[in-house]
């Protein structure tokens, strides 16, 4: 009780302030930075772990996963007819909802406001399955009502102010009138399903074809299932395994239920991000702890005579321990307070740094304060106990004379700590170099097509029917080098399916074939090379396939003139050409089978891609804008560049690289601060020795060698430890990419050399100050 009273009444505060030195300032800076990182990481982990936990039915919620012989795990996709079948045929199913797997981009006109918004198409019972509360109005269960919308509270306020929007009309794409039937509460940011506008998925029956939602072969949907209490999803899966084949015998797809609460973290791979952040947090905590402990040891032995006086006056070892721990608690408490204030003030930048969003108050929570408090307590106890172990063995007389020697165990521990520090720092530098090399590899790898100076325009409104006119108008400009209509972007061709047949195809082989519907100029616009055959023209009809698909058809014969058949839509079309493989998906995936199909009307033409000259770029863009506005005056003009889309594919890797830069620099800085702390202590111990050596003719270079050799040895040990660990970690990380860079030996040598040079610079700067001192003054002092 008295000890707590002593701490709370700041009994030791005057003494702490009296002993406040430059090393104390550095200690506070290190603690503040380290604790700020811990707060940020704890917020990130807490937010990731909270995903989807707000749903009341989370324990009984499941996603439909579909897989075939090509993918043992599968994807959270479903054929559209399955949810309805499950509602009717499986007593354990309480409800099921179908969602389109991508949002529709619509132009909304509300009064005099025009704006593009993304709309989620889904079944009405989506709001019954998930905890998306309806605040105003209601969503009719009658699916025949298709021209209706539900909007979020945020969008209601944006477009209607404080007025009730229920019953109001919104014009969609300058054509259809939709009625707002409900307002739902804003969906939390920690939801894996998010939208601000909802419309019935039954719209697709009108937009695509009647019976479209009753098909058993189209994996363009997500489906979610709510089971009754105490119903085993594993038992449902036994019945579900062959359900698609019962209605579509040709299909190789197998469906199963997957727990919705595991979808975000496990199935989508975000658990790896948590593990990475936990590892980084652990590394930073170790670095800060070692740095603080080392500096505290140095500061403690500088006050050795004070402790000698206290021992002569009867102070017990327990009292000395208490003083050391309270002093450490004071520092970590101040560092923690500074960290909270700084983190709070720069929250927006910090959240952007880790790819999160939220209010300032959200980052400072009970979880982050608890994490910070636990870390601070551990650091304070260790930094009080470790130097106390040596002090307690020193007699009061020797302490007053400044004569003492460390226990061998403490000395070894000190070197082990500094070695661990530099192992972590070198490891982070290696990871930084490899991740940066991989990112550079991704950006500079030959994709098999030209993405530079290619812009694209979304075809909407009048442009849908005037798309060919638009193309010809733009090609009249001499700075427009080429143009092509296409249903998909060449870096986003995700429309695929099985069921394609050809002569000689094995019965048990049904690969997923991606395809894009386009025109005669696609190959020229993107600079894709022909391997054999010809590209389709107006007078030459057929499909062009890539090398991967050609090898599937025949490994040793040309696929030209092979007839491809798709019985579901009654298509028979010959292969007339083979193109070189190009990357139409991120480089984390291997190049799959691809077909380029002439305009047959199976897929909607969504884009016009325009290759422009780098010369007179501004005037060319102005010409494109004027032409588009002339043909489509009621829609806002917008355009995009393909290379910008490509950059966005690797935002996650870019963010990782930036994080590695910050953490590597921080690790090096903290490690050097730890070195500086140990040097203070060693110099204090060896001041007399250095003086005697200089009197006996030792040169400055010899003194530097004396002080440097032990550290260099331990940094080499650090390098030996860091290399295999970093290699293993980055080898695992690179496995997520189908195409990856090599891990070269020079990366490890360079990382070790950088760490060694920085360490030697730190040691040399501190050692020079001692080596240049007048030996007469040193010996007189001693």
Image: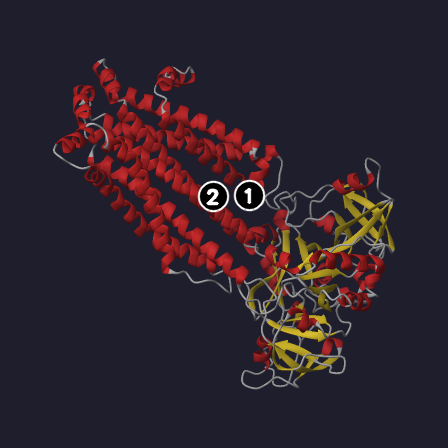
Q: Which mark is residue 230?
A: none
Q: Looking at the image, how many numbered discs can be counted on the residues?
A: 2
Tell me if residue 781 can be seen.
Answer: yes
Residue depicted at x 60% and y 33%: 360
Q: How is the image coloured?
A: secondary structure
Q: Nearer the viewer, residue 197 or 717?
A: 717
Q: Position of residue 409 (x, y in %)?
A: 22, 37
Q: Spot the residue most to the front.
A: 616
Residue pictured at 29% horizontal, 26% vertical: 300
Q: Report, in whole angstroms, how far the alpha carbon at label 1 lies from the one at label 2.
A: 10 Å
Q: Position of residue 257 (x, y in %)?
A: 61, 59
Quarter of the image for residue 236 reads bottom right
> In terms of depth relative to the viewer, which is nearer, 621 or 47?
621
Q: Secondary structure under badge 1?
A: helix
Which residue appears at 47% of the width and 46% of the height? 661
Q: In what quadrant of the picture does the N terminus appear?
A: top left
Packing grade of label 1 (10 A; few <14, some 14-19, many >=20) is some
16 up-or-down from 477: above or below: above
Residue closest to the eye, 456 or 364 = 456
Whether residue 365 is visible, yes or no, is no
Q: Residue at x 25, y 31 (%)?
A: 770
Which badge, 1 or 2, is on the more N-terminal residue? Answer: 1
Badge 2 local density, few (<14 within 10 Å), some, or many (20+)? few
Q: Residue 662 shows which numbered tag?
A: 2
Q: Secondary structure at mark 2?
A: helix
Q: Nearer the viewer, residue 334 or 520?
A: 520
- The answer to the question of whether label 1 and label 2 lie on touching residues, with beta carbons closer than 8 A, is yes
Relative to 429, is 20 above or below?
above
Q: Which mark is residue 353?
A: 1
On the rendered structure, is 48 left or right of 13? Answer: right
Q: Residue furthest top?
A: 313
Q: Quadrant of residue 67?
A: bottom right
């Amino acid at each position: 009780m008295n000890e707590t009273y002593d701490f709370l009444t700041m009994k030791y505060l005057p003494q702490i302030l009296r002993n406040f030195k430059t090393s104390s300032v550095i200690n506070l800076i290190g603690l503040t930075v380290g604790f700020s990182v811990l707060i940020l990481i704890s917020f990130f982990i807490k937010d990731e772990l909270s995903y989807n936990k707000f749903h009341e039915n989370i324990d009984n919620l499941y996603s439909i996963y579909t897989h075939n012989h090509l993918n043992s795990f599968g994807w959270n996709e479903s054929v559209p007819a399955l949810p309805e079948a499950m509602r009717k045929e499986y007593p354990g199913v309480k409800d099921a909802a179908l969602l389109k797997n991508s949002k529709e981009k619509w132009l909304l006109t509300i009064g005099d406001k025009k704006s593009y918004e993304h709309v989620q198409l889904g079944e009405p019972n989506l709001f019954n399955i998930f905890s998306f509360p309806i605040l105003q109005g209601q969503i009719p269960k009658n699916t025949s009502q298709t021209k209706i919308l539900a909007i979020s509270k945020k969008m209601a306020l944006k477009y209607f102010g404080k007025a009730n929007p229920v019953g109001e009309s919104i014009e969609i794409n300058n054509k259809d009138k939709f009625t707002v039937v409900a307002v739902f509460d804003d969906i939390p940011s920690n939801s894996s399903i998010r939208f601000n506008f909802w419309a019935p998925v039954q719209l697709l029956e009108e937009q695509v074809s009647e019976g479209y939602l009753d098909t058993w072969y189209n994996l363009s949907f997500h489906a979610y299932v709510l089971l009754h209490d105490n119903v085993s999803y594993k038992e449902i899966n036994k019945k579900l395994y062959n359900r698609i084949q019962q209605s579509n015998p040709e299909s190789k797809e197998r469906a199963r239920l997957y727990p919705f609460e595991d979808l975000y973290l496990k199935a989508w791979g975000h658990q790896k991000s948590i593990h990475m952040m936990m590892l980084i947090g652990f590394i930073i905590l170790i670095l800060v702890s070692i740095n603080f402990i080392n500096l505290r040891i140095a500061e403690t032995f500088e006050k050795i005579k004070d402790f000698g006086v206290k021992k002569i006056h009867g102070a017990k070892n327990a009292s000395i321990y208490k003083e050391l721990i309270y002093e450490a608690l004071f520092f970590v408490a101040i560092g923690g307070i500074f960290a909270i204030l700084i983190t709070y003030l720069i929250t927006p930048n910090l959240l952007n740094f880790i790819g999160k969003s939220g209010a300032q108050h959200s980052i400072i929570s009970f979880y982050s304060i608890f994490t910070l408090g636990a870390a601070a307590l551990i650091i304070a106890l260790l930094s009080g106990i470790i130097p106390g172990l040596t002090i307690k063995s020193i007699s009061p007389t020797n302490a007053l004379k400044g004569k003492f020697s460390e226990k061998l165990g403490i000395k070894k521990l000190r070197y082990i700590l500094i070695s661990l520090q530099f192992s972590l720092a070198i490891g982070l530098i290696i990871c930084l170099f490899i991740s940066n090399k991989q990112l550079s590899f991704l950006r500079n790898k030959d994709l098999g097509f030209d993405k530079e100076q290619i812009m694209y325009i979304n075809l909407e409104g009048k442009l849908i029917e005037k798309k060919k006119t638009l193309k010809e108008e733009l090609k009249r400009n001499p700075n427009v080098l080429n143009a092509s209509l296409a249903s998909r972007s060449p870096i986003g061709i995700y429309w695929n399916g099985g069921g394609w047949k050809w002569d000689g195809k094995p019965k048990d082989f049904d690969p997923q074939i991606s395809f894009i519907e386009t025109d005669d100029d696609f190959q020229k616009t993107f600079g894709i090379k022909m391997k054999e055959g010809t590209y389709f023209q107006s007078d030459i009809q057929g499909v062009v396939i890539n090398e991967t698909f050609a090898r599937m058809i025949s490994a040793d014969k040309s696929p030209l003139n092979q007839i491809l058949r798709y019985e579901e839509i009654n298509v028979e079309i010959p292969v007339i050409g083979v193109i070189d493989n190009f990357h139409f998906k991120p480089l984390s995936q291997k190049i799959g089978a691809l077909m380029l199909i002439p305009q047959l009307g199976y897929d909607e033409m969504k884009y016009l891609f325009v290759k422009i000259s780098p010369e007179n770029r501004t005037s060319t863009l102005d010409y494109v804008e004027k032409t588009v506005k002339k043909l489509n005056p009621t829609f806002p003009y917008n355009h995009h560049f393909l290379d910008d889309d490509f950059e966005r594919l690797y935002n996650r890797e870019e963010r990782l690289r930036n994080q590695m830069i910050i953490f590597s620099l921080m690790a090096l800085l903290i490690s050097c601060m730890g070195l500086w702390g140990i040097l203070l202590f060693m110099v204090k111990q060896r001041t007399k020795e250095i003086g005697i050596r200089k009197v006996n003719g030792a040169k400055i270079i010899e003194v530097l060698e004396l002080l440097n050799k032990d550290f260099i040895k331990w940094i080499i040990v650090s390098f030996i430890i860091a290399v295999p660990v970093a290699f293993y970690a980055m080898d695992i990380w690179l496995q997520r990419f189908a195409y990856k860079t090599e891990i070269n030996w020079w990366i490890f040598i360079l990382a070790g050399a950088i760490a060694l040079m920085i360490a030697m610079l730190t040691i040399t700067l501190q050692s020079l100050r001692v080596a240049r001192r007048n030996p007469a003054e040193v010996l007189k002092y001693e």
